Amino acid sequence: MKKTSLTFLIVLVSLCSIATPNEKKQVSITRVSGIAPTIDGTLSDDAWKEAEWVSGFTQFRPFENKQPHQQTAFKLLYDDDFIYVAIWAKDGSPDSISHRLSRRDEGDGDAVGIELDSYNDHRTAFAFWVNAAGTKIDYAISNDGEEDSNWDPIWWVKTSTDLSGWFAEIKIPLTELRFKAVENQTWGLQLARIVYRSQETSLWQPANKEQSGWVSQYGILNWKGTVMPKRTARITPYIVALTDNYQKQEDNPFLQSGHNETAKIGFDARLGISNNITMDVTVNPDFGQVEADPSQVNLSAYESYYSEKRQFFIEGRNIFNFPLMFGDGDLGSESIFYSRRIGRKPHYNPDLNDNEYIDMPQFTNILGAAKITGKSSNGLSIGILESITDKTMAEIKDNSTDRMVMVEPLTNYAVARVEKDFNRGNTQIGGIATSTIRDITSEDLKYLHRSAHTAGINVKHYWKDKTYYVSMNSYISHVEGDSSAITNTQTAPARYFQRPDARNVSVDSSRTQLTGTGGKFEIGKSSGKLMFMLASSWKSPMLDVNDLGYMRQANDVSEVLWVAYRIPQPFSIFRKASINFNQSNKWDYGGKFLGVGGNINLNATFKNFWYAGFGSNVDFESTSNTLLRGGPAFKQPGSVNFWSSFGSNQQKKFSGSLNYYKSWGLTTNFAAEWGINTSFTLKPSSRTNISIEPSLSNSHNELQYIDVYSFGSDNRYLLASIEQKTFSMSLRINISITPDLSLQYWGQPFIATGKYSNFKYATAVKASNYTDRFSLYDATQLTYNNSTNTYLFDDNADGNIEYEISKSDLDFNVKEFLSNMVVRWEFIPGSTAYFVWSQTRSGYEESGNFRFRSNLMDLYTDHPRNIFLVKFSYRFGS
């Protein structure tokens, strides 16, 4: 299969066309000779008379390089501290301009923006956009097109409208930009405009949609004389007051009052170390305004992946990216650095004696964190992050005693990342190193690694105007700890060294350290209508990055071929369309072939702005080293998955979408699933946005792992069929009173049920016939005790029970309601007041029966937990 993929790749290369880059435009910026403009959106200041209007915009969407239906012009000024931008968005139908007010970075409606490659590295830029209602949209761009909207600089903007169109007046502090102190320097520059009603995007510097990269296609901004970089220096202290209200429990000493009040202080600071390097510090940080993670039920052996939502860790995070795999599915989330490890839920969950109660912290306390990021004048990007989390104690009480138990040790986390650009950004070479060091003083925590370190290098090179690329990374991990910790690592779901048929691994309970390696290689074409990628990745059995990274599976070798054909220009009834195909093979590190699969999908946007997509995945019969969770490899039947999606014009006051998927066994119905996800959005006014997203799914799986137990000298790997039903419905309401004052509400009821049946145990796990791979328990081997609600397993029907399991450990009915309401007021740039109300309701039953109406009503009669929080922060400095 590898030879076939390589041959196909060579044929593709010979058929490919190369996108032609556009000629670069140039413009000069004018120094203000008198009084700087006052930012009011009217452009009435005399200073604007010193600069000429620059026009000549062309379409980018839908028709590349055609004349736009609405013309745009701009002026640029600067002084010692600021850049000033005036944009005139001319419009022949000013009544049709869309003035949609929303929270920062969630802009909708007509918009204009300026993007500055102040490093002039053709890969990095800072973007400042505003819509006609005055909502700010800002983001940092890295890697020639990756946007980070969590970058929130300090800047000023006002807008106004008259009969000729609308205007934006912008003031950008030089402290927010990074550039060299040289005379007559040049930057990359792009000005852009979106006309909402026609979804027409026009650019000052023409760009090619088929060409890879975005910043590398910018025009040129010329400076006359010398402009000096400015170092930022600011501190933002905060204070938080919180009240937590919950149901009283007279027997529980921690919940007897029904409420708890706390207060907290801390600060964030930013300091310019040099012209291009800044340090961010947070001391005793608070993330109370952050939205809760959505509910889910996870029956797999792997931990759930959650995206980062905390501002300190998401701003500037692109520099720390070091992915282990490729794509955007489960594998795409694997990385050497996963910031959710910092401040995580404590590892240890103490056992309780009868009549004991526990006050268990939900998160470890971050004492402080510091982050240094930036890019030098010679193209060297750096990122250094260090954080210390305090030891975390749980308090346990009964009627007469009170004890403290350590559930997480004092831990130091560190990450360092560097990357150097060469050849006008066409070549990058970089490296990363991470470190986790724990001060383990409790016997209860010796199962954790005492230290964990990783290091990696990456290389990427483009050629033919970024049409083709080749990239490689390689990394190593080393963990140390007590022998019990290293044994746990060897038998964890990512490795399962205890598998009886493992050819290349085995458990060594005397080890106190493990060292593993991994890497990936890609070659492909990223420009033009026809694109492709051939890639391979490998992870050795002893690789472990999970102390500060995220990885589902070690002992893995994969190959992927991806081919896509896209038509970015309108044709027939379509605005744009694409078709994608990919194929993959998988082995373990010992060379055992595990399986092959592939998918194909088609996506199209129509000229009326509706869209549709279809796709199908096929995974052929495979070998699973993980299904029996430490047991022998199991031959798993193949499966087919189909999905489709449809959506209406999202510019309308009311829009909706529908997504449906269905999967089934390829040769036997061992597993099946269907699901439907819908969304409806209502925009009743220019200040309000309401969306609701119901979803419902139903799944059947005959091979759900339960447990392993001993039967004579053998292990019995217990499986069962499970029927799962899941319902959730997210409601979001966004109300923007002004560009700086907003209210956001999110609420989600969640119901999930699971019912087990048809218990079986694995037998001839690699038999040709699917039903020979397991044996169902009959009535003489399996009984149910009604008085104890327990399943009793008597394998040889001799009256001696080999294993038992409570029904309460199997069937489930989980009900949960989560909600957040956040009022945010940025009363001056960088200074913010929050009011937050969070509510949680939860319930649990052991029935496994899905009863929608009664489950929903039960949920709303469960006693709520309400948290009210007020947070105030004030910025000092610039």
Image (cartoon, rainbow, N blue to C red):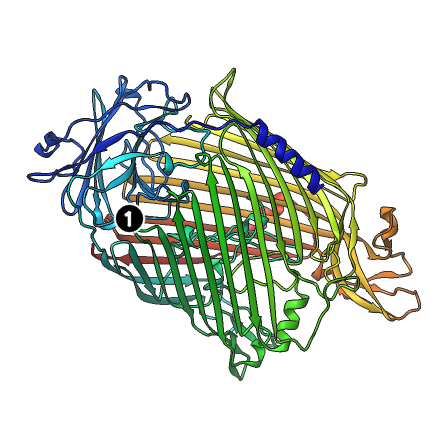
Residue on which disc 1 sits: 153
Would you place residue 20 above or below residue 839 in this image?
Answer: above
Q: Quadrant of the C terminus?
A: bottom left
Is there any visible trace of residue 466 in the rendered image? yes
The residue closer to the viewer here, 149 or 800, is 149
The residue closer to the viewer here, 166 or 593, is 593
In the rendered image, which quarter is residue 102 located in? top left
Q: Residue at x 58, y 46 (%)?
A: 856
Total count of labels: 1
In the rendered image, which quarter is residue 352 located in? bottom right
Q: Residue at x 63, y 49 (%)?
A: 752
> Residue 8: x percent and y percent?
65, 34
Q: Amino acid at mark 1?
A: Pro
Q: Residue at x 72, y 51 (%)?
A: 755
The residue closer to the viewer here, 526 or 272, is 526
Is there any visible trace of residue 861 in the rendered image? no
Left or right position of 803 against 536 = right
> Residue 799: x percent and y percent?
91, 69
Q: Quadrant of the N terminus?
A: top right
Left or right position of 575 against 659 = left
> Residue 806: x percent and y percent?
74, 64
In the picture as drawn, the residue positioned furthest to the left comes out as 34
The residue closer to the viewer here, 600 or 734, is 600
Task: Decide: few, some or many residues near mark 1? Use Cα within 10 Å; few <14, some 14-19, many ≥20.
Answer: some
In the picture as drawn, the residue positioned furthest to the top comes out as 572
Left or right position of 19 against 305 = left
Left or right position of 332 against 593 = left
Would you place residue 306 above or below residue 98 in this image?
Answer: below
